[in-house]
Amino acid sequence: MVIKRGQLQIQQLAFLIVAIFLFFIIVGLFFLNVSMGSIKGSAQDLKTEKAISFLSTIPSMTEFNANCANCVDKDKLKAFVYFSKEYKQFFPLDSLRALKIYPKPENFSISDELLCPSSECIILFNSTKPEIVEYSIFVPVCETSKRTGIVITDCEIWKLIGGVEFIE
Amino acid sequence: MVNKKGEFGFVWIFAIFAGIAILLLMVYMTSKILDTSKKLSDTEIGKSLSIVLDPLSAQDLRSQLTKISFSSPTKVEVGCVNKGYGRSLLTVLTRSEGKTGEWTGGEDIVVADKYIFSDVTEGSKNLNVFSTSFKYPYKIADLTFIVSKDYCFIGAPTKVKNTYSVLNNLQFDNCSEDQITVCFDTPLSSCEISVEGFCSDYLCDSEYDYGFVKKEGNIIPFTDSLLLAAILSEGSEYNCNVNRLMYRASKIAGILLKKNEFSSSRGCRSGVAGPLAVLETGFLDYDPYGFITDTETILSLNELNEMGSCKLW
């Protein structure tokens, strides 16, 4: 009878220890889940911030810059498409495209959306994921041509749209 | 009764050991969580630093200086990975406790679009970040310099003075003992670093448009704004970033050639397409010693582009 009571006490203690242990593990898991959520949130914020600040530097990059301050060269935009696969690993953006805004574009689809890709919409690179957040800037896009011996630069207003994928 | 006492004693011993084990585990887990949150905070600072550096390259200004302040002494370590476009690696380190504590850092932040040269070896609350563009012959990128040591340039030409005068830890000619002395073609025995310039073409702004930087028994070839990079960074870091820059230069040459194809159809043909094709292949695996042999040709290519009615860059 005495031995049985001792065994019971040890069992009670063991259950108590397991319960305390499980309690701390559950509290720990809850804490981890909350902190992981905030880590993901701040990682997404930093990724977005980086994408926005990078987007504003694009017009000054030699790969895009025309011979005027913060202008984008239309020919360079078209040329970039041939190199975009390699540049994608270099850019902190998951997608990048350029759309003509002014003068009013003409290449519209039946559903009244701008046809892409076309001469008025250039897809520089695309995201593989459907869910992306997009940010945009307006830029003057210029094209130089020579007519009757005179070099003429025509500029239009385009929109550069950069996208970032969600962190899962 | 004896038996009961013995069992009671065993239960207590068991409880004490289990309690100690749980307490130790909790203390261990708490310290791990604290370490992780510190690493997380350092990593966030590193990422923020890489974002703060972005506007420095967004300007069309030739060079500019920014001062970044931290709330506690911070050390920034810069690494470089050289493969294709490569990348710079930024690691922010902070001290765990007091002034004597160990420096611990966050995860490496990958910055693919920056070329960072640094001389930071000690922690500081302020960082001087200097940015200037690198042209060869077209603008390839903006170089970022994180400067912490004090330098004194002796006999620097006007162009060098004008470019770097904004740096507040750089002095010209009147040197004090604690500064690192950099001599321009005056091989004084007291100089820790000496610069030798070779540019003699009429297109040169100064003879230091290209040349060698001699330091710690090493000879480092430079051109344009890579002069400061050669002065303050380590040899391996310098070579790695030069390779990355030249790889990008090759890709830019490819884009410019394609642009020339498109604009030719509108009557705008450039006379530099031929040499550009050579640069596109030549800049891949470029040897920095090429700066010594090629810079004058590159300058004349830039001149040729400037003279054309349809400029490629």
Image (cartoon, coloured by chain):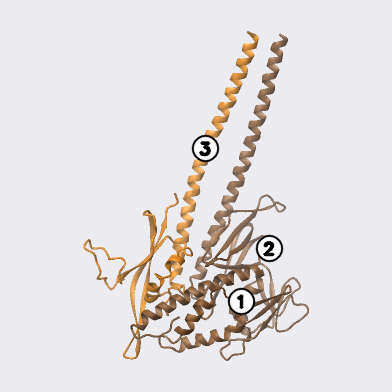
Chain colours: A orange, B brown
Q: Chain of mark 3?
A: A
Residue type beneath disc 1: Pro
Estimate the spatial distance between the alpha carbons at disc 1 and disc 2, rounded to whole Å: 26 Å
The three-letter amino acid code for the residue at tag 2 is Thr
Q: Which residue is mark 3?
A: A29
Numbered disc 2: secondary structure? loop
Q: Where B26 sits versus A82, above or below?
A: above
Q: Earlier in the sequence, mark 1 or mark 2?
A: 2
Label 3 in the same subunit as label 1:
no
Q: Position of residue B236 (x, y in %)?
A: 65, 68
Image location of residue B105, percent across then percent down: 62, 54
Percent coordinates x, y for residue A161 in the rendering: 37, 64
User: Residue B121 bears which disc, if any?
Assistant: 2
At a point 58% along the width and 61% down the height, the residue shown is: B89
Q: In what element is the residue under mark 3?
A: helix
Q: Tell which of B33 and B203 is nearer to you.
A: B203
Q: Which residue is mark 1?
A: B288
Q: Amino acid at mark 3?
A: Leu
What distance separates the C-alpha of mark 3 from that of mark 1?
54 Å
Frontmost of labels 1 and 2 is 1
Judging depth in this view, the residue of A55 and B240 nearest the camera is B240
Q: What crowding class fits label 3: few (fewer than 14 Cα within 10 Å), some (14-19), or many (20 or more)?
A: few
Please indicate, yes or no, whether residue B54 appears anywhere in the rendered image.
Answer: yes
Q: Quadrant of the C terminus of chain B?
A: bottom left
